[in-house]
Amino acid sequence: MDSQAVDFSLPNVGPGPDPFSLSALPDDVSFVVIFFQRDFYCTNCRSQVQTVADRVGDFHDRDAEVVSVLPEPRERAAEWQSNYHLPYPLLADPEASVSDSYDQPVRFGILGRFSDFFGRMPEVVIVDRRGSGPQIAYVHQGRSTFDRPEIDDLLAELDDLRVDSE
């Protein structure tokens, strides 16, 4: 599955570099787990970011940084941050340009493209930063608003990636 990961620069309302980019992370961060959210109002997204926050230490134990990308303006992302106090970067992608560059799935044709509320589905991407350039090592593209990988499955994926390189 390895393919070149797209570096990007987005406003960050959470901890970490602002603006955030893959290249701005310290060298000891081997992996970046990017959670592409649907929109500001998505209750499943809100639940997911809180669940990830509860388990962020498990990701850090695997040399992975967690990042959540919200296809909303900085002000909306800042509302999430003030409500949830996420211990990881929360990025605003108001034009959904980064989400689109990582092929976040969109349903319902033109209606889905017109409104993320109707069409944007969740996606999780693991970027492997080891080696000559960041590579996409894992992708889960949700087919519904509920279709999201379990945290333990993502941690197992990171474990497998770490073992494969040894």
Image (cartoon, rainbow, N blue to C red):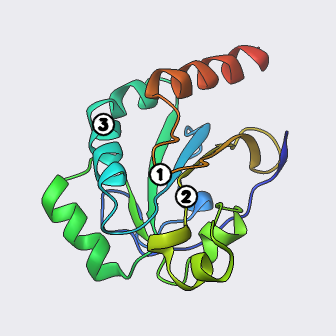
Q: From the viewer's perspective, is residue 143 above or below residue 18?
A: above
Q: Earlier in the sequence, mark 3 or mark 1?
A: 3
Residue 121's tag is 2
Q: Position of residue 114 (x, y in %)?
A: 56, 85
Assign the N terminus to one quadrant of the image: top right
Name the one closer to the observer, 46 or 135: 46
Residue at 18%, 53% (x, y): give it.
Answer: 85
User: Which quarter of the figure has residue 23?
Assistant: bottom right
Assign the C terminus to one quadrant of the image: top right
Name the one closer to the observer, 64 or 118: 118
Q: Residues within 10 Å of mark 2 (few under 14, many from 20)?
A: many
Marks 3 and 1 in Cβ contact (< 8 Å): no
Work out how far the residue at label 2 is from the one at label 1, CA to CA, in angstroms.
6 Å
Question: Is residue 151 toward the left or the right of residue 113 in the image?
Answer: left
Q: Earlier in the sequence, mark 2 or mark 3?
A: 3
Marks 2 and 3 in Cβ contact (< 8 Å): no
Which is in the foreground here, disc 3 or disc 1? 1
Extreme-left residue of the structure: 83
Q: Residues within 10 Å of mark 3 (few under 14, many from 20)?
A: few
Q: Which residue is mark 3?
A: 51
Q: Amino acid at mark 3?
A: Thr
Which is in the foreground here, disc 2 or disc 3? 2
Q: Which residue is mark 1?
A: 145
Work out how far the residue at label 2 is from the one at label 3, CA to CA, in angstroms.
18 Å
Residue at 46%, 63% (x, y): give it.
Answer: 38
Marks 2 and 1 in Cβ contact (< 8 Å): yes
Question: Is residue 80 toward the left or the right of residue 32 in the image?
Answer: left
Residue 53's tag is none
Q: Amino acid at mark 2?
A: Met
